[in-house]
Amino acid sequence: MKFLWSLAKKNLSRSRIRTSVSVIAIAFAIIAVVFARGLISGVLVSFFQNHIYYKAGHIRIIDEEYKLKERLMSLNYTVNGFNGEGYLEMIKKIKSVEGVEQIIPRLKFGAIVSLEDDLVGMVGWGINPVEESKFTGIDKKIVEGRMIQEGNKEVMMGAGLLDKIGRKVGEKVTILYTTPFGSFKGSTFQIVGKYYSDLQMLNDMVFYLPIGEAQKILEMPGEVTELLLITPDHYKAASVLPVLNDIFSQEDKSGKYILQLWNKDYDLIELFDYAIKIYNFIYVFIIVLACFVLVNTLIMIVNERTREIGMMSALGLKSREILYLFTMEGAIIGILGSAIGAVMGGVLTKVFSVVGIDYSAAFEGIKTEEYLLSPIYYTVFSLENLIFCFTLGVVIVTIACIIPARKAAKLEPTEALRQI
Amino acid sequence: MALLELKKVKKIYRQGKIEVPALRGIDLTVEQGEFTTIFGPSGSGKTTLLNMIGCLDTPSDGEVKLNGDEVSKLSPKQLAMVRRYNIGFIFQAYNLIPVLTAYENVEFAIRLIHLSKDGEIRKKVLKMLEEVGLKGLENRRPNELSGGEKQRVAIARALIKEPKIVLADEPTANLDSETGAEVIKIMVKMNQELKTTFIFSTHDPLIMKYAKRLINLKDGMISADERRG
């Protein structure tokens, strides 16, 4: 078989242009697939990170009813510890669970700021400044002023929100809100920090305040709307669920809490899972399309070399060996095209993993506050992607080559020798 | 035991509903070392007969025995193995592989039978090329060789595996008379030195002059079978 492999290699030099066109077709397909996978990975990494940071953590503890009324920012279904003992007691009990690294309390509520002729809607996030900074690094996004501190009646706002209300760092702002008891109240806060985030929701809608202050103004001592649990690896977060479920089945007598895994019970995440499966089909489809060029080339080659196939049959080559010879010719084109495509696709992915792709123009005019979509995506460069695409290319191309190779192998030697 | 034995071999081709008989019952025995020519008018069945002998095709009826073994009922894969080890072919149009050098074209045939080590193969191929008068042209590709040189490569390729029979279909048809004569002389020499059986299908009077046996084929039947001293 070694000499057939060697012959297959030499046969590629018969028509260098034809071979080159086939190699280029495969290479372009692989470049497209490498880049598309890198981009999709980048979108997913960005979306999953935002989803975990600002929505779900790795596991989210909420009141079961809150899940249904979350969009209304209800403050009547809160996390107030097991049997009303307060969320801090609950944190103490959960923190001992192996695999739980950090617990982030958040108290989210709707608020408005009244301007002379307008009302600006916003969302207040009562947070533990230290834990929040450690988790999301929000302190690193501060472009002016400082991070809020527990015990102070102060807020930190997104740059877009500050623009909307026409305030600056150092000024005061009166925020209006409704308590869980239905009272419409207002409190004045010092604006101590301004942060910038490319997430429209965070930049234009959210302001942070110390959790103690949020509980005080809302008259909700010991209550938060959610607790986010952070584990060492979000893909392995489910492994801590059995222990947590045991604790909750023992402690949560009323059964009001639910534990939400970051990738379950969220429609958009499930949609992404579905999309990934569809994309996998699209990748295969792109390569199959490129294979048409190669299959066409090989069919032409088989037709041109009919007499030669007859001669090889006469020399005693079995059908299987002729099949092998032509499949290898295609496979070598597949290997070359896939290797070139993987390398070039890798370079392209690497470049865009640094410079990113800016979708800001596409997002203009679209309200993305509800979705955790960043306008700039960075492709993810990984060797695994290159190896996967190279292997996928070689396998699909080789399989495709069997069609013309079988045509060659099935030729009757007498018929083949008769061809002119 | 005869090297080749054909008994009542018939071959019928079907063209739609019409049956076209190409061989109508051939009885033929060929011994080791014969230098035989099959001749006859166009359409007389020469190529079909050669295909039967060369195990490229199987008869519709009758039997073909090579070295005493019945080969007419073998599968395509088994026939390929019979051809690989026992039969050499020389074609009118040479049928060399254009991307291989003269050396590699000859080597190709011997590589198939996996009998020798690399060093031995090299020696054997070079010796064979020398025998057919191609010393110094080993590294030339077919497009760098003349017609006569190409046919010599084809002869070397047919003989390198030391087959029992070499079948040559109009081997001099594409050559001028002088080159044709040289090629025939090489085959005569090989026949004498190696005792390889040669069977030709040809109209070339020169080959017929050297042939030890002349078989005349007419309408798919042997009309004359003449042996010479």
Image (cartoon, rainbow, N blue to C red):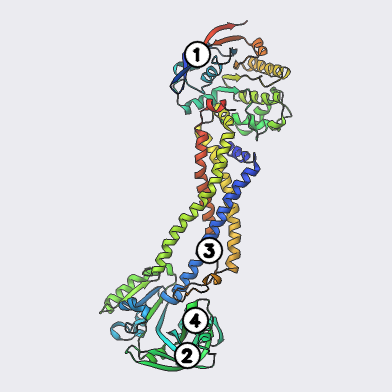
Q: Residue at x 69, y 21 (%)?
A: B175
- Mark 3 vs mark 2: same chain? yes
Above or below residue B93? Residue A379 is below
Q: Earlier in the sequence, mark 3 or mark 2?
A: 3
Graded by Cα atoms within 10 Å as few (under 14), some (14 to 19) or many (20 or more), the crowding at tag 4 reads many
Residue A117, disc: 2
Give the amino acid at mark 1: Glu
Residue B23, disc: none
Above or below residue A209? Residue A313 is above
Structural distance between the alpha carbons of marks 1 and 4: 96 Å
Badge 3 element: helix
Q: Which residue position is annotated with label 1?
A: B5
Please state which of the two labelled residues, at mark 4 or mark 2, is closer to the viewer: 2
Q: Which residue position is annotated with label 3?
A: A39
Q: Residue furthest left?
A: A253
Chain of the residue under the numbered disc 4 shown in the image: A
